[in-house]
Image (cartoon, grey):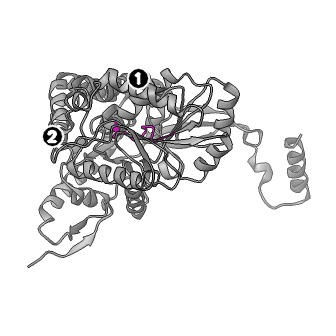
Amino acid sequence: MMPSTTQGPTGQMTASPSSERTGPLTELRRVFDKQKASRWRVAKSTADERIAKLRRLRDGIWASRAQLEQAIWDDFHKNPTETDITEVSPTISEIDHTIKHLHKWMKPVRVKTPLPLFGTRSKIKLEPKGMVLILSPWNYPFYLLICPLAAAIAAGNCCILKPSSKVPHTAHYLKELIDGLFPEEEVALFEGGHDVSDALLEMPFDHVFFTGSPDIGKKVMAAAAKNLASVTLELGGKSPAIVDETADLSQVASRLMWGKLVNAGQTCVAPDYALVHESRVDALVGECERAVAERYGVTEEDRKKSPDYCRLVSERHAQELKKLLDDSVAAGAKIVMGGISGDAGERYLSPTILTDVTEDSPIMQQEIFGPILPIVRYSSLDDVFRLIQSRPKPLALYIFSADQKRIDRILENTTSGGVTVNNTIIHLLNPELPFGGVGNSGQGNYHGHFGFRSMSHERAVMSQGRPELEHLAYPPYVEKVRKRITDAMKYLMK
């Protein structure tokens, strides 16, 4: 007998709770209920107790760094040094920043009291949201799970974590790491596919933190809404890079190619396409070719053998990118560098640049998430603004220019989750800056204090002291009361 199925929040056809999925569902529910029973104990933990957990997490990461590097190599063939740069180092920096500032963040914030409330004292007390679900993606499977976890621990929450099944080696490493560091009634991690994610989304968490695509983000938000859970959505989109007439092209190429090719372009804030002034296109292509040759080798064979060039996450993703590239060339785009794919199973696509790309080219219709840089020519900034404003709001925007007035004009006429001027990606490494999207690219933000706040409820607390004035406005509303209120409003309007 076939089990009955339902359409889960993440789009997967999953078995109903009465089917053979009941076993795993029972385990999820058991751990959820166990955390729910611990929720108030964990919420009352002190700053020192939370810092001890964060130190345990940081030290556990450092002690198992070699295993993490091996797991990510097995999933991506990613150089261990690049893993250190993009996964380990920013995670440890985030944890250390949180440890340093947590005592201050947890203190209630005193706020001013308006005159009509004379005699009262007001403060904002940040308290844990309670039960947090963190759903992480496959592209940076360690960093994008542990950083929100650190924020959730700092805020005093219980957490259930679900890494992507597309990176099984890293997911298994994370499972062993978390199981070895935390009791399951405080932090637990479940491996598995979409059915596990769907089952977790059915449970009444207080907050859901999701990193992934906008399409799945909508489904996660809809599922969270059924339980009136708050959400942080870190999504993606087509993040543009603008290169004007004044930019230093050697510098642009070096930084643009790094942002595009790190993790083989599988980065949510990678420069998705470049809007380049028509007078600079050919020169920029030449500089980009030199930058790629210096880093990955001169010939295609050199680049294919390079130990420093990451692979795509799956053969399916490689095939989808190759089809997107072929369709774009058929529509008129020109490959001026790369475009070479590997044999079946190699998950390889060479660093690629396309020119003669138009707004309606297939490659301009979706987020690329791979090592392909389309270049769109422009003649005036008005053309740039029209194109960017006509599209969903991107997660990041990059401006390459030596003209501050032009930079300011671009900022005034565009919107994005974040911006880096004369570089790419690095804005997300500053814990003093909020990281998050806007509209199609996300909702809410985190990193540093912003992450602590996203995992906390800002509770308003007012204490009545002496004297108190509100009795002067109690009914009955006789003439003297009305005059008193009118005089007070006139005074406040001065």
Report if the CB atoms under discs 2 and 1 are less than 8 Å apart: no
Please provide percent x and percent y for residue 73.
18, 33
Earlier sequence position, callout 2 versus callout 1:
1
> Along the line of sight, which residue is nearer the eye, 252 or 33?
252
Q: Which residue is drawn at 41% across and 46% down?
A: 129
In the displayed image of the protein, which residue is found farthest to the left? Answer: 1
Dot 2 corresponds to which residue? 169
Q: Residue at x 39, y 34 (%)?
A: 260
Query: Between marks 2 and 1, how big is the CA–CA gap?
Result: 28 Å
Dot 1 corresponds to which residue? 97
> Along the line of sight, which residue is nearer the eye, 24 or 340?
340
Please provide percent x and percent y for residue 400.
56, 29
Select label 2 or label 1 by which is in front. 2
Left of 131 or right of it: where is 187? left
Dominant SS in magenta: loop
Could you tell me which secondary element the residue under label 2 belongs to? Answer: helix
Read off the magenta span.
265-274
Please provide percent x and percent y for residue 297.
28, 24
Left of 300 or right of it: where is 237? right
Q: Residues within 10 Å of mark 2 (few under 14, many from 20)?
A: some
Q: Considering the image in quadrants, where does the N terminus appear? A: bottom left
